[in-house]
Image (cartoon, rainbow, N blue to C red):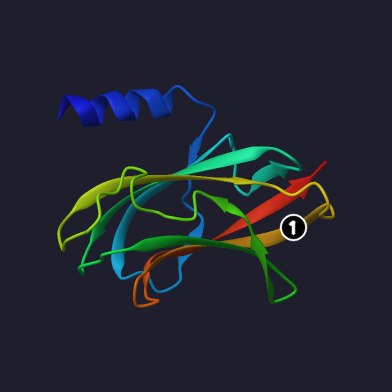
Amino acid sequence: MNKYLAVVALLSSCSAIFLTEYTDCGSHGIIHSIQLEPCNQEPCIIHKGVSYTTHINFTAKEHSDKLSNVCHGIIAGAPIPFAVYPLNACGNGVKCPLEPGDAEIYTATVTCPTNVSTMRLAGKWEVVDQNGLDLICFVVGLKIVD
């Protein structure tokens, strides 16, 4: 319990927001909360060249041996891939293999490319298992600025 409280205290000290305006896009896990930092409003203002970290509190409903990150910006209905580090989702607060009922706080970082236009878009985040199924999938509104 103390470990959990320490994580919550650390996360709350950052310029971050718990996202409330997101759409689950077919998660096979249960998303309890999503925190994005740095971000202090919705939709989040994303600055070119800046790294953003997401913390996802979830519970698994199925067994997963391997997990991979996938991130897209959806612009005019077309998914544009964004690089995610690390690509392997295991080991970032998530123990693999993951078993049904395991509760985890998953963490990953994305850097906004510098060569994108200033725009509003939807960001789609997925954590995909070894069978190509979405353990976590959500879409959130974003605004990219200089």
Q: Secondary structure at mark 1?
A: strand
The quarter of the displayed image where residue 78 is located:
bottom right
Q: Amino acid at mark 1?
A: Arg
Q: Horizontal and vertical percent for residue 40?
A: 58, 35
Report crowding for label 1: few under 14, some 14 to 19, many 20 or more residues within 10 A (C-alpha).
some
- Residue annotated with mark 1: 120
Q: Horizontal and vertical percent for residue 60?
A: 23, 61
* Residue sitting nearer the eye, 97 or 21: 97
The quarter of the displayed image where residue 12 is located:
top left
Residue at horizontal 74 percent and vertical 49 percent from the top: 113
* Residue sitting nearer the eye, 133 or 39: 133
Quadrant containing the N terminus is: top left
Residue at horizontal 59 percent and vertical 41 percent from the top: 52
Q: Is residue 68 left or right of residue 94?
A: right
Rendered position, 64 above or below 106: below
Q: Horizontal and vertical percent for residue 125?
A: 51, 60
Quadrant containing the C terminus is: top right
Q: Is residue 67 left or right of residue 86?
A: left
Q: Is residue 86 left or right of residue 145?
A: left
Q: Horizontal and vertical percent for residue 32?
A: 31, 52
